[in-house]
Image (tube, rainbow, N blue to C red):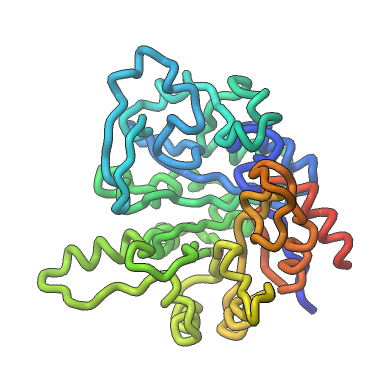
Amino acid sequence: MQQPTRLIAHRGASGWAPEHTETAVRLAAALGADAVEPDLVATRDGVLVVRHDNELGETTDVASRPEFADRRRMQTIDGWQLEGWFVEDFTWAEVATLRARERLPQLRPLGARLDGRDRVLRFDELLAIADETGLDVVAELKHATHHAALGLPLDAMLADAVTGTHWISSGRLIVESFEETVLHEVRDRGVEARLVYLMGDGGTAADLAADVVARGEASAGARQTPPTYAEQRTDAALAALAQRVDAISVDKAVLFERVDGRLRTSDLAERARAAGLGTITWTLRPENRFLEPEHRLGDADGAWGDWTTEWSMLAGLGLEAVFADHPDLWRRIALAAR
């Protein structure tokens, strides 16, 4: 019998409160989430913190803090040039003084009303909240190759955080990354977690895993073009992945296709299941901006479209789990699908 699709609160109930905050995590539990997903990055002194990315300007008040004005800089991360304030330039003591802000204030003014209420969480603090609320944890290791090059190995930090606790073998910890290498490094350190390989939605040369690119650049005279995420979703590639990881996690756009101009679900979840892989999708959001064109209502990006139709299509795929910003909305779909 097929197991019900699990609900992962994407950075907490981030549709209702600023993401990755204690408020968002506790609200996710209250709204019926099975698990919470924290993104993990590292400070200069090796502390795992819970942030969407290693750039802090989008989700904290760092830009308004004059004492940190000189930390603003530009750097290239995984092939992309970014400007801002980067967590690896701060100690944990400094990050602990920052206050969290809504990342999408124009789309989510309700969340923006809570700006400044919460501080940034450490990973160990999030684990404690998850224990208290009964949530499982789906930890995403962000920019692992970038961090490793700075002497900040995320696999070692995660292992250190869970060693000596029940999380190291409880079955309640999932580890995911867009870079497969770090997943195996985590397991090699004795962490008994379900491993999930995150995959981008495109098939362009720019849509490559950073660890794969780094290996190619390090190989003298390398000629072979590394596979894109799309190329890693062929039947043969999925069968090979199933020997190394437990599940794939894909942008929900990959689970849709258009045939004769009509939107329908793709066969990826079925093919992955045949290969022995679970399939997870991200991120379910009700706003027009994040829906397929057929499900948008009106022109306003922040208005809610026909999310019920879109999410119901996904509910019929037998997915291992879905990521949602509004856990209560997915619960409505799950109840209707029974």
Measured from the top left, where is residue 198 in percent x and y?
Answer: 49, 62
Q: Nearer the viewer, residue 227 or 191?
A: 227
Measured from the top left, where is residue 86 in percent x and y?
Answer: 35, 33
Residue 81 vs 26, above or below: the answer is below
Residue farthest top in this picture: 66
State the count of labels: 0
Relative side of 113 to 116, left or right: right
For the point 31% across and 30% down, which residue is it?
89
In which image quadrant can residue 174 be found?
A: bottom right
Residue farthest left in this picture: 221
Residue 64 vs 285, above or below: the answer is above
Measured from the top left, where is residue 246 in percent x and y?
Answer: 54, 71
In the picture, the quarter occupied by the N terminus is bottom right
For the point 55% across and 27% down, which residue is it?
100
In the picture, the quarter occupied by the C terminus is bottom right
Q: Nearer the viewer, residue 184 or 23?
A: 23
Is any atom of residue 133 visible in this view? yes
For the point 35% across and 18% down, which residue is it?
68
Measured from the top left, where is residue 329 in percent x and y?
Answer: 79, 50
Is any atom of residue 130 visible in this view? no
For the point 63% across and 27% down, which residue is it?
112
Residue 209 vs 50, above or below: the answer is below
